Amino acid sequence: MKIESPCPCLSGKTYPDCCQPFHTGERQPETAELLMRSRYSAFNKGLLSYLLVTLHPDKRRSDDAQALQETITSTTWLGLKVINHKQMDDHHAEVEFIAFYQDNPVGQLHENSRFIKEENRWYYLDGEILPPIKLGRNETCFCGSGKKLKRCHG
């Protein structure tokens, strides 16, 4: 029996039961939070085409593929923590999250991202970078190990 790996977005589901159907086009994310999680997983798995297609067409630039590929190549993602998901109306939402990455010490991308839904599909618009948060050594580690931060990535 094959044991499926957990989804990189740390939803608690396996990858095939979480982000993989979005990445393969079998399903569309029903919420902005699911799109954000699937984009994080796409960065984690190096799925450049998914990152490009989920970026709103008005926000796409000719150098996006190169910039995204550089991020994919140079970054080791360690974990994701969703702070808040705010649905403004049927077509606008914001998701605040922290994506942790390998650095010395561990780096944080703390962002409040904006999303828009058009033609029944969510797109990433842009995000406001926020300052890193202070992590408590006794908090559960952001990587999903279940250990305390001080015993894992602290």
Image (cartoon, rainbow, N blue to C red):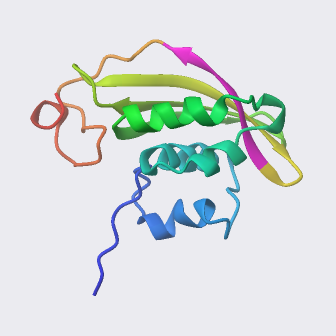
Residue at image location 70% in from the left, 56% down from the top = 30
Q: Does residue 108 lie above or below 84 as drawn?
A: above
**Residue 126 among magenta residues:** yes
Q: As rendered, which of 1 and 140 lies closer to the eye? A: 1
State the image coordinates of residue 120 (x, y, percent, origin top left).
Answer: 84, 55
Q: Nearer the viewer, residue 2 or 154?
A: 2
- Residue 91 at what x, y percent from top left? 84, 41
**Residue 130 point in image, percent of width and height:** 52, 15
Residue drawn where x is 39% and y is 58% of the image: 12
Q: Residue at x 28, y 30 (%)?
A: 102
- Is residue 15 shown in magenta? no
What span is in magenta? 122-130
Quadrant in the rendering for residue 77? top left
Residue 63: quarter of image:
top right
Residue in the image at 38% along x and 23% along y: 108
Residue 139 falls left or right of residue 41: left
The quadrant of the picture occupied by the N terminus is bottom left
Q: Image quadrant of residue 73?
A: top left
